[in-house]
Amino acid sequence: MSVVLLEDGATAAADSVVSEGSWLRSGTTVSDSLLAEGVFAGFRCVIASAEIGAGTLIASQARIGRPDAPRTVVGPGAWIGARADIAPGVTVGAGAVIAAGAQVTEDVGEDAVVVGRPGRFLRHRRPVEDGLPRIGSIVATVLARAAQTAAPAVPEGWTVGADCLLDSDLAGPGRAALGDRVITMGRGDGPSPDGGVRLGHDASVGDDSILEASGGIDVGDGSRLGRGVLVVSSGHDMNRRSLPWQGGPVTIGAGCSVGDGATLVGPLSLGDGAVVEPGALVVSDVPPGHTTSGVLQKGIAPR
């Protein structure tokens, strides 16, 4: 029988229904909403006054609807990217893909791909019809591992702030620092053997950051990730209706600076000394020594 997995720190208000086979990651809140079977919501999402269709995948820190506002509707099998924002009263069609960081204020058709701020139509998907996304087996694996596996060891020389959630392999050769309320996930026994977070000597990660390292995140010596940075090292194959997982490793070179609130979605590499400006969305490589303000206005296709 399917279960609902609400991680510690995830909340679904009494006025909401979260259906069987769904999974809400830590920090996600659901109010006055209906989530159909098999919905996934990543870390620190906010879902309010919304109806979410079966098999929808919602990446971390997405925002769908607002409290006490017209209802937002997301059709079955949609994919809502990291830090996407869907306004009250909007309808997102079945199978639509909303790219990371997109801001959606108008209705979106079935299988449409929308990018940018404000959101704009990019193209239609024409996926292989292999069924809606299904996360039931992943939920079962997570539950089994939680019951059997000890928390990952923190490497010697690292400092870890208060109220962190560390659910990843962690490695690094020397001194490194994680700020308060940092979340990490991703292990080598997951979908990719490269899963995990690897920090170079004197690298640091700011408060409230999220490192999703199922595809692997490597940070070079002396690099600094600011407050509230989100790094995602995986995505989904849009060419199939089931949106299967696919790796997108992220490599951050030595001496890089990633500004507060920036979002990195792999696969990508930041060359040594690269600078990512605060709030930027980066989805492709940045050469050594270069500065980027991101791609939200450039219509780059989602990963």
Image: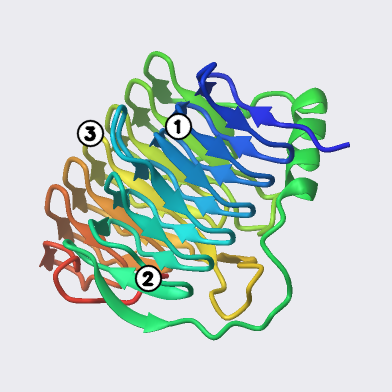
Q: Earlier in the sequence, mark 3 or mark 1?
A: 1
In whole angstroms, how far apart are the C-alphas of marks 3 and 2?
24 Å
Q: Position of residue 251 (x, y in %)?
A: 39, 60
Q: Which residue is mark 2?
A: 302
What residue is rendered at 29% in x and 72% in y?
285
Quarter in which the N terminus is drawn:
top right
Quarter in which the C terminus is drawn:
bottom left
Which is more foreground, mark 3 or mark 2? 2
Residue 183: which disc? 1
Looking at the rendered structure, the secondary structure element under dot 1 is strand
Looking at the rendered structure, the secondary structure element under dot 2 is loop
Q: Position of residue 105 (x, y in %)?
A: 23, 56
- Side of 175 relative to 151 (left or right): left
- Side of 282 relative to 280 (left or right): right
Can residue 173 be seen here? The reply is no
Q: Which residue is mark 3?
A: 227
